[in-house]
């Protein structure tokens, strides 16, 4: 068999400068004398050869020379010394976005990339449809690459790399950004190339299980030299042995000095609790702040860039017009060319704006993103006839599932300065529910109608009348179909029950525990409904999210705290890792409570992204990573999970009362429709300690385990950009036999204040 690649005594030298003018000295040596520099040999005497029809995996720590050897083989970089011989045409994907122009569309970049690779337009035309089909980007091929997520860029780059004619394929770690299904598709394609078509593949990755499963041999690089080469099992086992501690703990855990907390998690995959409703994974869409982003008012069209950012999250429901605007929103005035101003400010500012994101634009977005609409009808300043007309208008344009909510927090007096007569009495709201229900059902018998309930909040409450829920539950059956609860936008005020400003550790510790209060409130509402003869009535948690705001000076006892309060500091807490873990905990609660059928986070953009002014410079907040993981649970089957560990207590904070006897770790487990895969979501609530988890799957056979973890150095880290304060999502795949302890149970170490989703499969996932 002939050589496809032959490398002899390859060496590559870089010069590393340590003075400020180094770049000028390097480029213009005749103008400036050279400063101090250190020679760094990225490759030092590397020799190897590959046969046709071989797949070689390259492993090694960062800085060992893996990417350097690929760049030389691809012709991107020239060696300092040595020889390289390659037989045939090379296709490569060395970095995300390499060879792309981000101001061009996906379609234009296919032709640009093909031209760079030496293909004629006719040749590119012949493979264009195959590239589009493989990338599965559909209509996004006509969008600029600046609107693409990293996963979408990877899809397009890989599709081009494997569809152009080649004899040698070079891949460098970029597959880590793709979703699991596309990764699996890519690895199957790579295996087909070398096993069935006799092509040569070189694959660089830190994922040792992928390397072992795909590759026919492995090269281990260390300090620019080849440490070992040979069969995957032998080389990878030696590599694991040397780096066993680092591979086991990962970067977020290694730096933690506190003792590990033991946890036993038991999963019963044989029992099924319920199919998880897809509508639990929803979001509010504000007619102003969100609407100005998802819809381009100047061009009168959807903002494709915004849609591209939202689409990977898989939201299945959008609530509109969002928050307190609902009880001042007159839908007819937001349709057509001439739109009248709507209330958009706070209760005291009384500001108004004409909305560009009206009912028509909202329905278009729901259709485009395959999400069900949930509309909050204006009961505060509107009429039942106006609501019925809106529902008729919707049904002329949309025939899918429709959820309706009557009013928004009419039990609360926050907006009294606007002149509206709030809060309402229980009897007045119950009467409005009957009136609106009759009017709506007369025009649409299929829409699901919800009535607003409330639960006592503790020290600082919005609950004005204890008879509110009783009045609703006394209405005739059929008046409404579900109970709507706004009880999970917490903690609102960063003050203790005794009007003290807490330390940050106290604030974040209570925030991580607060989902237990939300779950208890959901259970209390379900129990109250059962006592009223409405057992099992569905519940919608139609607003939830971490919400810190400035402490007002009008609440009794808060004057001193208000004087020390910083608006920017309090608002900044809303997009920290702790805030993201709070949302993860609320989703866990919604999955566990059998009555919860709908949940919608608030709001769509402002706590998912760090910038809303320029989407091309978007940085995802930690919440984005959480929803990217947990929204995959939609449609799966919930199975029982039990946690045995130490218990903790947290003090009262804002609207969250003191909590007692909470497990330091909490879990939710699901399985797929075929029963061959299990996913376990684990939240470590501890701010100080990693958790040593023992997993008992009750006999479920799993060959592979993939772990995705959202973690950071501190709970107040608030962005996902590389550098200090970064919240990152790591991913690693293991063979389960290597995770078993002496008791036969699987073991894993969870970083402090983190979310980990562990997926098990009893079949070969390649």
Image (tube, rainbow, N blue to C red):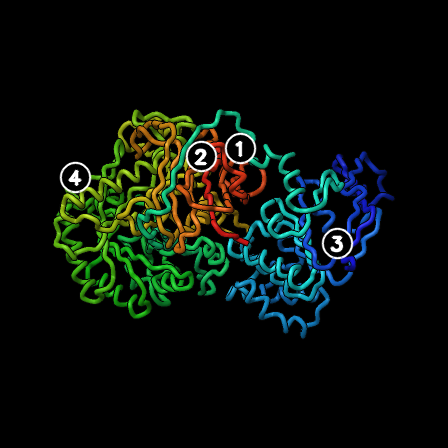
Q: What is the C-alpha distance between the residues marked 2 and 4?
A: 44 Å
Packing grade of label 3 (10 A; few <14, some 14-19, many >=20) is many
Estimate the x, y position of residue 333 in percent, counting from the top left: 31, 62
Q: Nearer the viewer, mark 2 or mark 1?
A: 2
Q: Quadrant of the C terminus?
A: bottom right
Disc number for residue 694: 2
For residue 135, what is the image quadrant?
bottom right
Disc number for residue 466: 4
- Residue highlighted by disc 1: 253
Disc 3, disc 4: CB below 8 Å? no
- Residue highlighted by disc 3: 50
Q: What is the C-alpha distance between the residues marked 2 and 1?
A: 17 Å
Disc 2, disc 3: CB below 8 Å? no
Q: Nearer the viewer, mark 3 or mark 1?
A: 3
At x 83% / y 51%, what residue is drawn? 83
Estimate the x, y position of residue 31 in percent, counting from the top left: 85, 43
At x 75% / y 42%, what residue is drawn? 226
For residue 512, what is the image quadrant?
top left
Q: Nearer the viewer, mark 2 or mark 4?
A: 2
Tag 4, which secondary structure? loop
């Amino acid at each position: 068999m002939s050589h496809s690649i032959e490398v002899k005594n390859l060496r590559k030298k870089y010069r590393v400068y340590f003075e400020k003018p180094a770049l000028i000295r390097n480029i213009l040596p005749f103008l400036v004398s050279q400063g101090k520099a250190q020679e760094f040999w990225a490759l030092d005497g590397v020799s190897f050869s590959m046969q046709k029809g071989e797949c070689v995996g390259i492993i090694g720590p960062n800085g060992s020379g893996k990417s350097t050897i690929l760049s030389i083989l691809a012709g991107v970089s020239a060696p300092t010394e040595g020889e390289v011989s390659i037989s045939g045409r090379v296709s490569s994907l060395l970095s995300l976005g390499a060879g792309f122009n981000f101001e061009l569309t996906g379609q234009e970049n296919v032709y640009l990339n093909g031209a760079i690779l030496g293909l004629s337009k006719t040749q590119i035309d012949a493979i264009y449809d195959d590239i589009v089909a493989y990338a599965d980007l559909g209509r996004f091929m006509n969008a600029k690459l600046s609107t693409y997520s990293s996963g979408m860029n990877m899809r397009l780059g890989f599709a081009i790399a494997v569809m152009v004619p080649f004899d040698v394929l070079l891949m460098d770690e970029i597959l880590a950004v793709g979703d699991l299904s596309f990764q699996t598709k890519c690895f199957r394609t790579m295996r087909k190339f070398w096993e069935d078509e006799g092509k040569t593949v070189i694959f660089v990755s830190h994922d040792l299980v992928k390397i072992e499963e795909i590759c026919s041999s492995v090269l281990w690089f260390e300090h620019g030299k080849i440490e070992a080469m040979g069969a995957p099992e032998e080389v990878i086992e030696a590599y694991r042995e040397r780096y066993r501690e680092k591979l086991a703990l990962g970067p977020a855990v290694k730096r933690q000095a506190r003792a590990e907390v033991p946890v036993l998690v038991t999963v019963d995959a044989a029992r099924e609790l319920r199919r998880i409703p897809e509508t639990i994974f929803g979001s509010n869409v504000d007619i102003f702040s969100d609407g100005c982003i998802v819809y381009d008012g100047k061009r009168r069209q959807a903002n494709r860039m915004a849609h591209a950012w939202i689409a990977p999250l898989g939201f299945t429901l959008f609530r509109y017009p969002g928050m307190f605007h609902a009880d001042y929103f007159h839908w007819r005035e937001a349709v057509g060319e001439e739109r009248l101003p709507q209330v958009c400010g706070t209760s005291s500012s009384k500001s108004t704006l004409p909305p560009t994101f009206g009912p028509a634009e909202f329905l278009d977005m729901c259709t485009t993103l395959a999400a069900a609409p949930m509309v909050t009808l204006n009961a505060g300043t509107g009429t039942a006839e106006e609501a019925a007309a809106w529902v008729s208008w919707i049904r002329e344009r949309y025939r899918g599932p429709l959820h309706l909510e009557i009013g928004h927090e009419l039990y609360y007096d926050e907006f009294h300065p606007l002149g509206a007569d709030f809060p309402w009495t229980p009897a007045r709201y119950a009467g409005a529910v009957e009136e609106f229900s009759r009017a709506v059902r007369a025009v649409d018998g299929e829409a699901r109608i919800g009535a607003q309930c409330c639960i006592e909040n503790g020290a600082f409450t919005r609950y004005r009348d204890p008879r509110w829920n009783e009045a609703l539950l006394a209405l005739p059956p059929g008046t409404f179909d579900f109970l709507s609860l706004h009880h999970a936008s917490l903690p609102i005020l960063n003050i203790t029950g005794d009007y003290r400003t807490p330390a940050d550790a106290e604030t974040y510790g209570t925030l991580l525990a607060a989902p237990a209060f939300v779950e208890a409130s959901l259970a209390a509402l379900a129990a109250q409904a059962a006592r009223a003869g409405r057992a099992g009535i569905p519940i919608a948690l139609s607003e939830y999210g971490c919400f810190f705001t400035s402490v007002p000076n009008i609440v009794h006892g808060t004057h001193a705290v208000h004087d020390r309060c910083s608006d920017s500091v309090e608002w900044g807490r809303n997009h920290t890792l702790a805030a993201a873990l709070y949302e993860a905990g609320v989703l866990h609660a919604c999955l566990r409570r059998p009555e919860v059928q709908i949940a919608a986070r608030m709001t769509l953009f402002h706590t998912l992204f760090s910038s809303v002014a320029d989407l091309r410079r978007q940085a995802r907040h930690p919440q984005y990573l959480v929803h990217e993981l947990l929204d995959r649970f939609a449609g799966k089957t919930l199975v029982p999970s039990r946690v045995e560990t130490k218990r903790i207590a947290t003090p009262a904070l804002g609207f969250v009362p003191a909590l007692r006897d909470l497990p330091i770790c909490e879990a939710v487990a699901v399985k797929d429709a075929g029963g061959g895969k299990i996913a376990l979501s684990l939240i470590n609530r501890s701010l100080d300690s990693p958790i040593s988890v023992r997993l008992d799957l009750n006999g479920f056979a799993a060959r592979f385990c993939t772990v995705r973890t959202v973690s950071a150095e501190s709970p107040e880290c608030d962005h996902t950009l590389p550098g200090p304060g970064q919240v990152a999502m790591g991913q690693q795949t293991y063979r389960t036999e290597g995770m078993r302890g002496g008791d036969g149970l699987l073991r894993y170490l969870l970083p402090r204040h983190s979310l980990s989703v562990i997926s098990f499969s009893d079949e070969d996932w390649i």
